[in-house]
Each structure stands twice: as C-alpha cells, then as structure tokens.
Amino acid sequence: MWGRVRKAGARLRQAFRTDPDIDRDMVRTKDRDRRPHNLFEAAAVYVSACAEDDQDQIDEASGWVSPEALSFGVNELACRAVIALARERDESPQTVARSLLGLPAS
C-alpha cells in the first residue's frame, strides 16, 4: 500500500517539476540564472505576456513548467487578483469577477 502512495507522490512531484533533468544541487546554488522557474513565476510571466500580447514571452513562460502546473498557477493568480480587487473596491469577489468578464450583476 505504501508503495502506491510513494509512486503517486513521485508522479505528482514530477508533474510540478520544471525540468526533470536538473540536479538538486544545482537548484541550491547561488547562481540564480541556473535556478529553475517555479509555477507561480511562470504564471505571472504568462498572464502579463498575454495582457501585453507578447507571443515570444508567452511561449517562453509556457516552456518553464508543465501545462498542468501552468494552468494551476494561472488559476491561483486569477483567484488572488479577484480577491485583491474585491477588497480594494469593497465588493464581493463574485461581483468583481463578473464585472471583469463583462457579465451582468447577479
């Protein structure tokens, strides 16, 4: 049973890993240029590139993490942005989300 749990954990870790061939010691080095990008970094660059219509940057950010990880990061960024805007506007997150999408208030 524990073998299955270990295998599932390893698959999950592999899905969120940016580059499976990177040595763990390299990640710990102080050389920031060689550090792999994390999914939140990729999501931030991807979303800002989409807003600026910068296809080269979109393609670059898409290659930093797996598509599943990028999707998760973009979703997390969207949630945090809606919450921040809702607090700033003193409105509910649902109202802000509908407003951003151009939908009528419910």
Image (cartoon, rainbow, N blue to C red):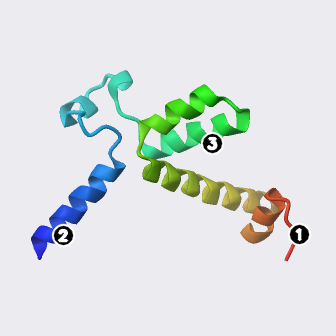
Q: CA distance from mark 3 to mark 1?
A: 24 Å
Front one among 43 and 4: 4
Residue 16 numbered mark, or none: none
Q: Is residue 3 above or below residue 58?
A: below
In the image, what residue type sits under mark 2?
Answer: Val
Residue 5 numbered mark, or none: 2
Q: Is residue 99 above or below residue 31?
A: below
Q: Is residue 41 left or right of residue 35?
A: right
State which quarter of the image contains the N terminus.
bottom left
Report the residue marked by disc 3: 47
Residue 104 numbered mark, or none: 1
Which residue extends farthest right?
Answer: 104
Q: Is residue 36 left or right of residue 3?
A: right
Q: Say which residue appears at 36% left-offset and 34% top-offset.
A: 36
Question: From this viewpoint, is residue 90 visible?
Answer: no
In the image, what residue type sits under mark 3?
Answer: Val
Q: Say which residue appears at 38% left-offset and 22% top-offset.
A: 33
Label 1 element class: loop
Label 3 element class: helix
In this figure, what is the number of numbered marks? Answer: 3
Question: From this viewpoint, is residue 98 visible?
Answer: yes
State which quarter of the image contains the C terminus.
bottom right
In the image, what residue type sits under mark 1?
Answer: Pro
Q: Looking at the image, tell me whether mark 2 or mark 3 is earlier in sequence order.
A: 2
